[in-house]
Amino acid sequence: MSDVVLRGFGWRHAGRKAWAVRDVDLHIAHGERVLLLGPSGAGKSTLLAALAGLLPADSGESAGTIEIDGLDPLHARDRVGIVFQDPQTQLVMARSGDDVAFGLENRGVPAAQIWPWVSDALDRVGFPYPITRSTAALSGGEAQRLALAGALALRPRLLLLDEPTANLDPAGADLVRESLAQSRDDATMILVEHRVTEALPLVDRVVVLEPGGGVRADGAPEMVFAAYGDKLADEGVWVPGFTIPALRSATAATPDLVRAEQVTVAQRLASVSLGVGEGEVLAVTGPNGAGKSTLALLLGGLLAPTGGQVRGFGDERALHKWRAATLTGRIGSVFQNPEHQFVTSRVADELAVGPRRLGRTPSEIARTVDDLLERLRLGKLARANPYTLSGGEARRLSVATALATAPRLLVLDEPTFGQDRRTWIELVTLLATLRDDGHAIVAVTHDDDFVQTLADRTFQLGTARLKDPLPRRRRS
């Protein structure tokens, strides 16, 4: 177990005016289990990266001090295990078992212990494949389990978890939380998690970061939420007990805008047939590894099916055969990993890419960029590098880039990942407005709140059955 002490700690990324996190005074004792909260962009992920010794001096400016058992984090790495917000960034080997063993080998664990420890860690997170499984073939949720197994296998004294269940199906998330609960005496733990209600049984303390710097609240969960619950909810923290009204469509959707007929992708997606019409939100759910992200790529025209066809917009050509400009003007896609679609070094420039490709005038592009910066709460980040954004900010930027060309179909893979309560509500309300204006929206999601609030229909992949439409409510 490890003792963590921060005194006036702060960090500012290179090229940014605002500090990502600042003036943090915090002491976490050996064996404590802490839930770290705060609105999107408050610095939670930056703080975890600092504790893991992953903020090189030449990548930004630091203030104050940070220690783990009296050591600088750079010299305490052998005591720390971390799971990043995007697990794909920490997978380094071609085979799953080798990836979990990688850290153990680098820390000099005796060879006779490595593979029993690997097997134990994979079992604890419910990894569903043999150790020979290619890491490139894993879904986002499966990669998240593997990354967590790699951290647990190290048997760290300090375990840092950045939304470890965000991409997991409900069963996988329950299994991970059960695994963490069973290891209560193994390590000090700092957990960043938007699923606050589910996370509370794992922790004994809640720390809330102030977006402008410092710590807003610190104490037992019941004390923090009783004293600050209303204010925290207003500022975007997912406080237990605060409900969100449904925003479903009041009218039936028009005939299918895009239709997939018996589409398959070898070893990634079994035969699926479904359609989405203008004026509806279709939620695609299902277990990790069922092929949801693959289906999203097919519906976005970004992947050729092995069998079957995807057609739409009255065009007889298959979507994947369209010209890039045609696809850009009709369909906007948001990938599971936002960084995979960023192509510039500034947020504002990223939003201009699509409109510029369609030949919009400079004044039209400027209006589009300014509007999206405001609507997605990204205005203060207009000049920031997209790769320095928090996970929640990067997700909002990826959604904004999809909206920049005003497409009639939006295909969104985990659109609410990393959002605080305020930005979640704003994003869901924006999607409801687009739906009511006649846009078609397909959302791959594990977010049950999103499904219950916004989805007009759900398609559970793996059952090959379209569920009955949810009851339609007219908004007051």
Image (cartoon, helix red, strand yellow):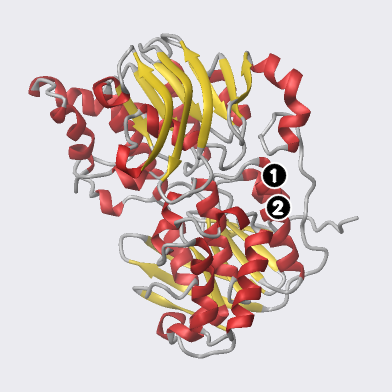
166 sits to left or right of 221:
left
What amino acid is at disc 1?
Answer: Arg
- At horizontal 54% and vertical 67% (from top left) the residue drawn is 401
Q: With respect to residue 447, does 260 lie above or below? A: below
Of 405 and 292, nearer the camera is 405
Using a 10 Å C-alpha cutoff, classify the residue at mark 2 as few (fewer than 14 neighbours), some (14 to 19) or many (20 or more). Answer: some
Element type where label 1 sits in the image: helix
Using the rendered image of the protein, determine whether residue 466 is visible from the camera's viewpoint: yes
Q: Is residue 133 left or right of residue 139?
A: left
Position of residue 282 relative to residue 287, above or below, is below
Q: Which residue is mark 2?
A: 426
Q: Which residue is mark 1?
A: 422
- Residue visible at 37% across and 37% down? 145
The quadrant where residue 240 appears: top right
Q: Is residue 164 visible?
A: no
Q: In the rendered structure, which amino acid carries the disc numbered 2?
A: Glu
Residue reaching furthest left?
111
